[in-house]
Image (cartoon, rainbow, N blue to C red):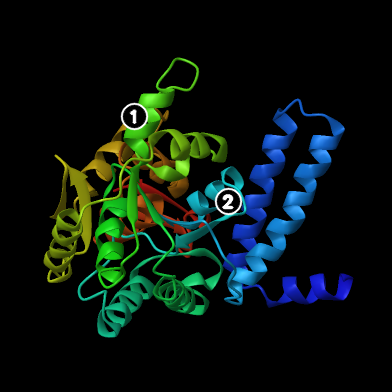
Amino acid sequence: MLEEIHKSIKDLSGSEAKNLLLSMMLRIKVMQESKNSPEEMLEQLNSLYHLFFEVVQNSNHVERDYSTVHIVFGESPAGSLRVGLGRENKVIGFPDFFSVGPIWALHQEVGRKYRHEWLKDHLNYSDDYLEEEYENRFSKTLVEIDGLSNETPIVIWTAENANEQTGLRYLLYLLKEKKNKIFVINTTFAFQELFNTPEFGCLDIHTGEVNGEHLNKIYHEKLSAPITDEDRTRFEKEWIALAESKGLVRIWENNKINTVNEDYLDDFIVNTAQHLHAKQSEKDFMKSARLIGEVYGQHNQLGDVFIEYRVRSLIYKGVFEIKGIPKAMRYYSVKLR
């Protein structure tokens, strides 16, 4: 058994191992905060053991029967769902962030290649993810979705942001030949209805900000009827319209996905830098991570990786001076000229 565990861990990709670790740590944190008996704690530890082999089975496409399939956009919310839902639920986390980068013809191989090349050329992801894992994980997810049984209900989790709303339309287009019942849960609205209290505060706009326990409650209390054929057709047409554009940046506003210019955030980045400089005794370099964090706190629909890309673009344009090497945000500092 120890040899089997060792081989299974060795066969996991870097991102699969990180996702597994995230899921296990989240579950351990829930255990620490609970007041369960030793017997219940032992049962939860046993569930962690089974979670490991479930992830291994998924990575090798070993299928078993599931009562429901849940699809969410991002590996972090997928980990939270696995923590919150029982083992009878299959969870698929789409390994991408759809609010930035080209989505032209993404439902075709040519579009996926085009997107991959743009991401590699412009965005700094850690651990060579884009070079070594992204394309393989994206393809494996498509195969996994294509292989879903037509009898299994599918729950798609979305929220009030461009990433998840774009992903919803893309996914429904991919599922257009499937006869499954498809349910859509808007995490933003459901969380606000169930947990918008002084104790929990108000959710921002991402499914990944909700813990597994709350996601479980949302699933059991806010799951409504499956979407209609008319709604499915509407979402499919909206995807085709999005996929005809070679725009690079999308935001969600007024219940609509809007394509904006690549430099959409540039003025705000500069204004934020001016504000941070004003707090210094004299204008000096600041860690780029500090600047990016401040911007992300106000504009988190586009992600910190994209914001870091725009900071580098402003460096190349001569707006910022740089100290260090811009291979990742933690390695360099900037100041306005």
Mark with earlier residue (2, 1): 2
- Give the structural element (helix, strand or loop) at label 1: helix
Q: Are marks 2 and 1 in contact (CB under 8 Å)?
A: no
Residue 308 vs residue 257, the one in the foreground: 257
Q: Which residue is mark 2?
A: 82
Q: Position of residue 274 (x, y in %)?
A: 29, 36
Residue 294 vs residue 84, the one in the foreground: 84
How many numbered marks appear? 2
326 above or below 27? below
Q: Position of residue 86 (x, y in %)?
A: 60, 48
Q: Answer with the quarter of the image where residue 18 lies.
A: bottom right
Graded by Cα atoms within 10 Å as few (under 14), some (14 to 19) or many (20 or more), the crowding at tag 1 reads few
- Which amino acid lies under the numbered mark 1 shown in the image of this protein? Ala
Graded by Cα atoms within 10 Å as few (under 14), some (14 to 19) or many (20 or more), the crowding at tag 2 reads many
Can the viewer see residue 225 in this picture? yes
Q: Residue furthest front?
A: 151
- Which amino acid lies under the numbered mark 2 shown in the image of this protein? Arg
What residue lies at 40% left-to-right and 51% top-to-bottom?
Answer: 304
What residue lies at 50% left-to-right and 57% top-to-bottom?
Answer: 75
Q: Which residue is mark 1?
A: 278
Residue 247 vs residue 337, the one in the foreground: 247
- Give the structural element (helix, strand or loop) at label 2: helix
| Residue 300 disc label | none
Q: Is residue 166 shown left or right of residue 23?
A: left
Camera-near label (2 vs 1) is 2
Q: Position of residue 233 (x, y in %)?
A: 15, 61
Q: Position of residue 57 (x, y in %)?
A: 64, 71
What residue lies at 48% left-to-right and 61% top-to-bottom?
Answer: 92
What residue lies at 22% left-to-right and 58% top-to-bottom?
Answer: 249
